[in-house]
Amino acid sequence: MIKKLLLLIAFVGIISPIYAQQSIRLNTGWEYIRQDLGGIWEAVRPVRDGQPESVPLWQKVTLPHCFNDRDAVDPDVNYYQGPGWYRTQLNINNPYANGRTLLHFEGAGQRTDVYVYTTKVASHLGGYDEWTADLTDAIEAFKHTEVYQKQFKGRIPVSIRCDNSRDLETIPSRMSDFNVYGGIYRYLNLVYQPSVSIDRLMITPVLDSTLTKGTLEVKTILAQHTQGNVTGQIKVIDANGKMVANKNYKVDAPATDGQTTRFKISKPHAWQPADPYLYTVQVTATADGQTFTSTQKVGFRNFEFKEKGPFLLNGKRLLLRGTHRHEDHAGVGAAMTEAMMRQEMQLIKDMGANFIRLGHYQQSRIVLDLCDSLGILVWEEEPWCRGGLGGEAYQAMARQMMTNMIQQHYNHPSIILWGLGNENDWEGDFAEFDKQKIRKFMKQQHDLTHRLDATRLTSIRRCDFCADIPDVYSPSIWAGWYKAKYTDYKQLTQDEVGKVKRFFHAEWGGDSHARRFAEDPLGYLEAKRTTDPTTGKKRDVQVARDGDWSESYIAELFDWHLKEQESMPWLTGSAFWTFKDFSTPLRADNPIPYVNQKGVVERDMSLKESYYIFQSYWSAKPMVHIFGHNWPVRWGKPGELKQVKVFSNADEAELYVNGKSYGVKKRNVQDFPAAGLHWDVPFNTGNNLIRVVAQKGKVTLTDQIEQQYETRQWAAPATMTAKVISTDQDVATIEVQLTDAKGVPCLDAANWISFGLAGDGDLLADLGTSTGSRKLQAYNGRAMVKVKLQQGHSVLSVGSPRLPTIFITLGGK
């Protein structure tokens, strides 16, 4: 009984409590309006007779939330760029005497103002870094007003204005190939802090060249409001929960330079992609009977970009196998949930990647934590992207964004490169484009980065007149897409390596319209190589402009690059652009309007065929995949041999078509295509069952698909048919097929198709995917869309230029 009483007394705070700060995600209870208000009073004015004095239509939303969750890929409008307001009422119960009450923003775009009732408490410029608004004093003042109890019944009204309006004097440029989103599109947290608190920790683990000795430097920087004598303890805990080091410290606050404590760690367990071992550093700060605790994960590793290559991690060569990521997702824009981020990063890891470039801005802390724990090395960069160089306010913003990114993400062992910008040779925002001024500012940012962090290198992609400034440079190559042929890749890369001290190949690949395939993509391209009547010479073709954008072509390009990279011992590594399709205001005419389609997964994370190509080269986990799971109908002449490709990391594989074996083939990385796992086989007219059995060591792997084979010739599209192909949980999937006048499917048709809906249902469109767009190009003469029936009756319209519009009835009796 006495024990229980003591525990109760300690809990309610009578016996010197040791508090840990509290953080609460503010996801629910928000209202939003996508427009400006006449002033803050319109957000908080009292309701009279059941109606406010004015009637702006606020809608209930959940955070994170993005202004542009749908209109970013609306084919008919420009995406919204302007102000929007959020409001809520909070119950504030700070348990700490003289503590602080904060709003912690993990990211909001692009200018943000925060109000308590009618008092502005904070403003922030920049859409990608973290920041806090201190509500403490405004809350205390508001509690002494009559309106606190009379109108708000003891709750605190908080209003937030976000604004992503165009502004040439801010970064990133609107010429960037991605949407500059608006909204509270990352998590927002209500934080209660004790009167003593740690502003940030800067932890520097150093692993010596023998990999047997480590040092750990912990710099503890207290918050400005912390006063008096502070004592604390620092613990270093391994992944098994064992404390391997600890020290006490004392400091008189405020201490502007922070308190530095050093440790020696014997035989530290090294961090690496195959074994992302993390230590926990726990730091406490105690004053006036209150304690603040900060916990960080860190890893011991060393790395080196050798001049002229390769890349070394912990003393051994590691070929960096990477991709890129934008913070963008179907139906939510930038407002990705933690579950979405985890799914995406796990897909990247499962693909076998060990590197990622986070383009082109500081990204969510959740993503960086996942890179640490999954073992994915990182290039992260400030959002100085395209457009040129603005004035002093522009440059001050860039300096601040770089500073914030480094200070906030300093402790992540995954980060090895700080990016100074992207494509800064792309002029257009300003009348003046002065290369020398850009060089000067680039050098200033390079120097600033090294002052803030002496342990990592700087990098930039594509700004040749600044190539000598960063520690690591990536030129623009794009073999087989924007220039040259994909077979020129190795030579073009080798030429570029010789021009800089340290080379990395960021951005390569090309667009693919999901579910579009071709029997002969290179033949299609060659047909575009017409003869110039003036010179009599064949004109050059550019795949980005003249290609079919099929998954078949991009598979060949990826396959070739990957097999070549395996035979380039001087290569540090590469990162293909990009992992996931994303929205962009610059590509209205793409097969899915306003979507950059260079991903190996769609904007909703549906896998394209190319995902498995990378997996077959990069992943250690046994896998096998027949190319063409989303290719339902192939075509050709009766008896014609058709190539079947199997992507696998198995040692060997045997192919069966319609029950007949076509032999066993050994995997050989340099045997193009598909590392030797390709067969030329005859198909039956109609249905064909394709099956593969692969062997990797003692593991047996299988995969199978069914494909129709069409031998009839078709003419130009003359009509469309539509049918419901599935219904699942009140969602119907409708497939449209283009046919000629005789009813033969037009398997190479790429007509534009538009969908409309009337009735009770909801057209699941403006998602920027091959099955979630109101307007898109057909893939092999077909297109799909989904409708949420809502247990009602609807009519779907399907239109295409110069073809009769058709209608299909959904739901109802």
Image: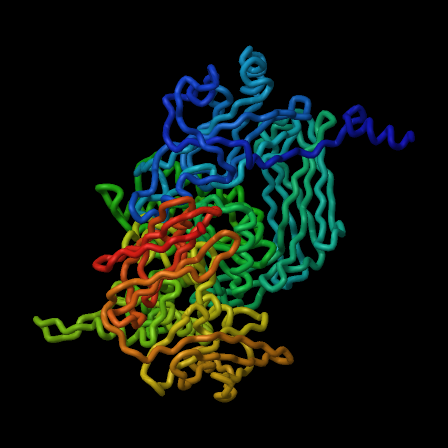
Question: Which residue occupies the foreground of this view, 406 or 343?
Answer: 343
Q: Is residue 140 left or right of residue 471?
A: right
Residue 404 visible somewhere in the drawing: no
Question: Which residue occupies the foreground of this view, 737 or 555?
Answer: 737
In the rendered view, would you say 540 is above or below 144?
Answer: below
Q: Quadrant of the N terminus?
A: top right
Residue at x 41% of width, y 76% of height: 708
Residue 162 drawn at (x, y percent)? 42, 33
Residue at x 65% of width, y 54% of height: 278
In the rendered view, would you say 342 is above or below 395?
Answer: below
Q: Is residue 310 left or right of residue 780?
A: right
Q: Is residue 720 left or right of residue 294?
A: left
Question: Which residue occupies the foreground of this view, 544 or 426?
Answer: 544
Residue at x 45% of width, y 49% of height: 789
In the rendered view, would you say 12 is above or below 342?
Answer: above
Residue 617 drawn at (x, y percent)? 50, 72
